[in-house]
Image (tube, rainbow, N blue to C red):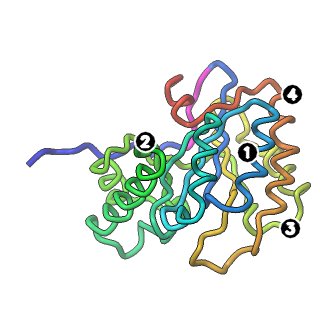
């Protein structure tokens, strides 16, 4: 039997270069493209943690995201909590299926993973490690943008967050899980908030990198 180390859980990556990571969950979706437009205008990179079951029909969006230099990560297959009531094999099945779905579109599997709802325990870490992920990526700066109706409020909560510092991992949402209804029906406020947040972060002197680029600075 080959022993595989568990993935390491991280929420921020300390560094002395004012580097942070901007991340998005739950896509690809119709709101991904306008967010990509903002990122392209500002010349920054982000990481998009995609739901495997959201990819069908959005392959072009996924390709554009990767083509424009952004990192594609796994957000599991069905966006269900992986740390509640699932066996190790079931968690692995979710991660393997999502990696295969991403690889079928982009030609390579993801190297970073974020569990839905930030749900993580030892089984999730073990499954992630067995599936080739070195890290379970959480976040240090986030708000409930998925349920907020005001772009100004979202932007303020991110830009005024107590943990917004070098090494921060920011979490926002460009999509809506296909099988869930417990949130806003759109991500329009987040799209508008990103257009405020990104220029403000750049003006403050932060370098916005992908998660893997940020990890390389550790």
The quarter of the picture where residue 84 lies is bottom left
Q: Earlier in the sequence, mark 4 or mark 1?
A: 1
Q: Nearer the viewer, residue 172 or 177?
A: 177
Q: Position of residue 40 (x, y in %)?
A: 76, 36
The residue that disc 3 covers is 149
**Mark 4 to mark 1: distance in Å?**
19 Å
* 6 lies above or below 69: below
Mark 2, secondary structure of its residue: loop
**Mark 3 to mark 2: distance in Å?**
33 Å
Q: Position of residue 135 (x, y in %)?
A: 42, 43
**Mark 4 to mark 3: distance in Å?**
25 Å
**Mark 3 to mark 1: distance in Å?**
21 Å
Q: Which mark identifies residue 203? A: 4
Q: Earlier in the sequence, mark 3 or mark 1?
A: 1
Q: Position of residue 72 (x, y in %)?
A: 53, 45
Query: Looking at the image, which residue is at 80% across and 24% down?
Result: 205
* 203 lies above or below 27: above
Segment tinted magenta in the rendering: 11-15
Q: Nearer the viewer, residue 63 or 117?
A: 63
Q: Earlier in the sequence, mark 1 or mark 2?
A: 1
Predominant secondary structure in magenta?
A: loop
């Amino acid at each position: 039997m080959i022993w595989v180390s568990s993935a390491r859980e991280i929420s921020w990556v300390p560094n002395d270069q004012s580097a942070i990571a901007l991340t998005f969950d739950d896509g690809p979706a119709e709101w991904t493209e306008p967010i990509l437009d903002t990122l392209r205008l500002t010349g920054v990179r982000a990481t998009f943690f995609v739901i495997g079951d959201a990819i069908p029909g959005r392959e072009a969006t996924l390709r554009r995201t990767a083509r424009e230099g952004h990192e594609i990560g796994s957000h599991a297959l069905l966006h269900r909590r992986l740390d509640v009531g699932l066996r190790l094999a079931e968690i692995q099945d979710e991660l393997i299926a999502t990696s295969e779905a991403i690889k079928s579109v982009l030609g390579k599997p993801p190297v970073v993973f974020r569990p839905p709802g930030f749900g993580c325990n030892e089984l999730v870490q073990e499954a992630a490690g067995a599936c080739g992920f070195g890290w379970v990526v959480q976040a240090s700066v986030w708000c409930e943008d998925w349920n907020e109706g005001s772009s100004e409020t979202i932007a303020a909560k991110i830009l005024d967050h107590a943990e917004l510092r070098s090494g921060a991992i920011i979490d926002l949402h460009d999509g809506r899980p296909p099988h869930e209804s417990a949130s806003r029906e759109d991500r329009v406020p987040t799209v508008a908030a990103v257009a405020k947040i990104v220029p403000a972060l750049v003006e403050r002197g932060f370098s916005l990198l992908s998660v893997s680029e940020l990890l390389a600075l550790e």
